[in-house]
Image: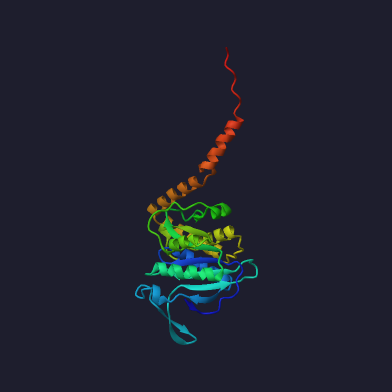
Amino acid sequence: MIELEDLPPLRDPIMILACEGWNDAGEAATDALEHLARLWNAEPIAALDPEEYYDFQVNRPRVVLDKGRRRIQWRTTRILTADPPQLSRSIVLVSGIEPSFRWRGYTIELMDFAQQAGVTTFVTLGALMADVAHSRSIPVSATSEDDVTMHRFDLEPSGYEGPTGIIGVLADAATQAGLTTISCWAAVPHYAGHSPSPKATLALLNRLAQLLDLPIDTGDLPAEAQTWEGNIDVLAESDEEIAEYVDALEKAQDAAELPEASGDAIAREFERYLRNRPPEKPEEP
């Protein structure tokens, strides 16, 4: 860990993490984290040594101009803190790139920092390509593997099995460390997965605000999301095959979101039917 500034005193901090790469369709998750960093004037306090975790032929350093002088900027995972006066808790933001190797060492280093900082809540943000319609609300799943956390935030356990990214590894480590751990994933339409995806970014921020009761000013994102949706409308209208596909997705998503489509709703309706059903008349002898 490269310390940039001393760790300031923190108030029951929430750590929020997003990583570039496999976990970040349309750059929705990392854009959400960057929005929070700007909104809350987050200050960098530490960074992971890139030599330990990155292949520089994959994640190449950048040449940047700093006050008229050229310098090399090494791409890595950076840790920022914010203490906005309107929030009752401090915020730790982790803006990273999925490591090329030594994932366990990377995970241990971040979990050690979380423990040092007194983090009690750990939230990961991710985005994936999915069969969803751009013209409908962007689904954001929020899951946890801890029974207490699931009950407290009304979450579901994840039913996913298969390859995972560093987000999944970190969420598992945080759960094992006893942190309140939540994973939020936005579903980005795969036919419109180019970057940026402001509608998915907005959906992630709104879900985060709802879950943690955080006031999050979304700024220009609603207008940007509307413009993005309009641009995809134009694309869909110009291609008959895409238009038919979008129409099928819309119908499927609308049906899935109907109240009567949920098992709980069906059960409640059946119970109502039984309560209101008139009593059977006795058979005539």
146 displayed left or right of 245: right
In depth, the one of 219 and 118 nearer the eye is: 118
Image quarter of residue 209: bottom right
| Quadrant occupied by the C terminus | top right
Residue 50 position within the rendered picture, expressed as x and y whole percent measured from the top left = 41, 76
Q: Residue furthest bottom?
A: 69
Res 111 seen here: yes
Query: 260 above or below 85?
Result: above
Question: Which residue appears at 39% of the width and 77% of the height?
Answer: 51
Image quarter of residue 27: bottom left
Colour scheme shown: rainbow
In depth, the one of 2 and 25 nearer the eye is: 2
Residue 278 position within the rendered picture, expressed as x and y whole percent measured from the top left = 61, 26
In depth, the one of 48 and 28 nearer the eye is: 48
Residue 85 position within the rendered picture, expressed as x and y whole percent measured from the top left = 65, 70
91 displayed left or right of 229: right
Res 93 seen here: no
Question: Which residue appears at 65% of the width and 68% of the height?
Answer: 86
Query: 8 above or below 172?
Result: below
In depth, the one of 62 and 103 nearer the eye is: 103
Question: Which residue appears at 40% of the width and 58% of the height?
Answer: 191
Residue 175 position within the rendered picture, expressed as x and y whole percent measured from the top left = 49, 60
Query: 232 above or below 247?
Result: below
Q: Could you tell me how many numbered marks the image carries? A: 0
Q: Residue furthest left?
A: 57
Image quarter of residue 234: bottom left
